[in-house]
Image (tube, rainbow, N blue to C red):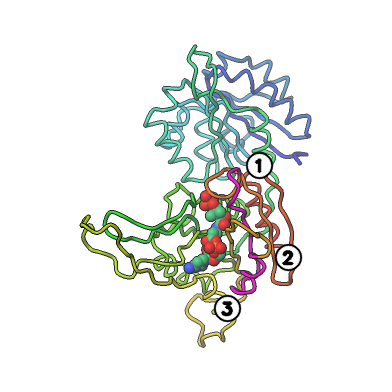
């Protein structure tokens, strides 16, 4: 719902600027208030009069024509619930990443501390430029969401990745961001992601196909819902919250347990190896004359089951510094290639967690490394709820809403 929400749109100097006119209409039709800031170059592609008529508001361009006592860049950023920059050129992306504030749009961006979404559009070679990619990573690490451009015919005559993504995608991203409930405000949420890496020797390892995408989506959604997030991951992502990179199951266990006493939620989306090599070789294992060799594996501790035991155990008194009573909600994930529900039911019972999210990894369109998922939520009271196939971002949000309100 966008009714009465304040959307501040920054338009920069790219040909896709003309497309934003329809988007302004869509936001207005949904009941939002829209204000627009243009960089001087944006007005080479679209007129002030058009934007003014569509937004039913004055279009802001210069920094030195304040309407009231507050400087424009501050009053606009105070006014907005969300800031959208579309299209975002390589130039503006670079300036925002470096904190340059040399026009009204970049000054507002510099002062803006609420949700910001950018939709880049540019020539495909510019898009691939190392500096542009690096700048985008910097923005992501600050919590700014970007909607990647799409492949296709570009106004410059090239064919490639660089077109502004669809207006529907931009509309949905803004709508979603405006409707995040702050149900996790003040809560500490610890989330694990990725497949653990169990070394055999300095060259080889045992791992699995987990990309960390599901865990990342959960961490980002929890952050958007106001949580203090601790993200314990085997994959390195740019994130605006605390990140702990680990490799093996043992390292993950240590990192999770360090955060557990002060956590309100622990969500184990990581695919943890059940076994590790008994003795890692310090040197590369050489090929010998044997046709077969045997690796001896030993069981890894079950991080999730151990946490659930800890939660049940009596509190150590006095409580460790900063620790709270043990009412943390513990959520496990399970990846099954057959008999999904049957195995999930047995697993929630065995591990003792509050919720278990069952994933069908026999399908290629969901689960490991895909952008979408379809899951079933089980709780310890035997309730079962299915979440239909959707982008992992949506699934993540629904899971968090579910576990935080049940
Ligand atoms: O990362 P993606 O590519 O996006 O894919 C997402 C996913 C499919 C990996 C993810 O959604 C998922 O299902 N993660 C759990 C995978 C898994 O390890 O399932 P499991 O059934 O083996 O383990 C059950 C639970 O116990 C998990 O919460 C796991 O983190 C935990 N566990 C397992 C073994 C172990 N030694 N310690 C654990 O804590």
Q: Does the magenta-highlighted stretch encompass residue 352?
A: yes
> Which one is earlier in the sequence, the residue at label 2 or at label 1?
1
Label 1 neighbourhood size at 10 Å, few (<14), some (14-19), many (20+)? some
- Mark 2 packing: few (<14 Cα in 10 Å), some, or many (20+)? few
Tag 2 secondary structure: loop
Q: Residue at x 53, y 14 (%)?
A: 155
In the drawing, what numbered circle is on residue 311? 3
Alpha carbon distance from label 3 to label 2:
19 Å
Q: Which residue is mark 1?
A: 81
What is the crowding at mark 3: few (fewer than 14 residues within 10 Å), some, or many (at least 20)?
Answer: many
Residue 68 pos. (x, y %): 63, 33
User: Bounds of the magenta span?
Assistant: 343-365
Q: Residue at x 55, y 85 (%)?
A: 315
Image quarter for residue 294?
A: bottom left
Tag 3 near tag 2, CB within 8 Å = no
| Percent position of residue 371, x then y | 57, 43
Residue lying farthest top? 157
Residue wearing tag 2:
406
Depth order, front residue of 296/40: 296
Residue 376 spot, x, y in % from top left: 69, 57
């Amino acid at each position: 719902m966008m009714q009465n929400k304040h959307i501040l749109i920054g338009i920069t100097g790219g040909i896709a600027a003309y497309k934003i006119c329809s988007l302004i209409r869509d936001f207005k039709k949904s009941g939002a208030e829209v204000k627009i800031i243009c960089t001087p170059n944006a007005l080479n592609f679209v007129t002030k009069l058009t934007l003014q008529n569509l937004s039913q508001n004055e279009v802001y361009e210069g920094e030195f024509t304040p309407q009231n006592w507050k400087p424009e860049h501050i009053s606009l950023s105070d006014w907005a619930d969300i800031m959208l920059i579309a299209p975002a050129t390589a130039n503006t992306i670079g300036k925002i990443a470096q904190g340059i504030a040399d026009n009204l749009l970049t000054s507002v961006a510099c002062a803006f501390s609420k949700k910001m979404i950018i939709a880049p559009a540019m020539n495909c070679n510019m898009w691939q430029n190392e500096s542009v990619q690096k700048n985008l990573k910097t923005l992501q690490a600050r919590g700014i969401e970007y909607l990647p451009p799409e492949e296709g015919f570009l106004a410059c005559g090239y064919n490639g990745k660089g077109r502004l993504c669809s207006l529907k995608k931009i509309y949905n991203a803004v709508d979603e961001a405006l409707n995040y409930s702050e149900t996790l405000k003040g809560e500490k949420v610890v989330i694990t992601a990725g497949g653990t890496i169990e070394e055999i020797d300095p060259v080889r390892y045992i791992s699995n196909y987990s990309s960390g995408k599901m865990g990342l989506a959960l961490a980002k959604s929890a952050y958007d819902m106001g949580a203090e997030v601790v993200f314990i991951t085997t994959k390195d992502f740019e994130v605006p919250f605390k990140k702990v990179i680990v490799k093996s199951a043992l390292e993950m266990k240590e990192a999770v347990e360090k955060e557990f006493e002060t956590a309100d939620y622990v969500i184990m989306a990581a695919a943890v190896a059940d076994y590790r090599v008994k003795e890692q070789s310090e040197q590369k294992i050489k090929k010998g004359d044997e046709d077969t060799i045997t690796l001896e594996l030993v069981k890894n501790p079950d991080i999730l089951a151990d946490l659930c035991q800890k939660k049940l155990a009596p509190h150590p008194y006095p409580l460790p510094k900063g620790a709270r009573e043990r009412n943390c909600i513990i959520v496990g994930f399970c990846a099954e290639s057959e008999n999904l529900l049957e195995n999930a039911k047995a697993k929630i019972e065995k591990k003792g967690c509050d919720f278990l999210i069952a994933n069908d990894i026999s399908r290629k369109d969901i689960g490991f490394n895909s952008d979408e998922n379809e899951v079933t939520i089980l709780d310890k009271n035997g309730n079962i709820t299915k979440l239909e196939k959707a982008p992992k971002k949506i699934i993540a949000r629904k899971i968090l809403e579910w576990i935080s309100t049940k």
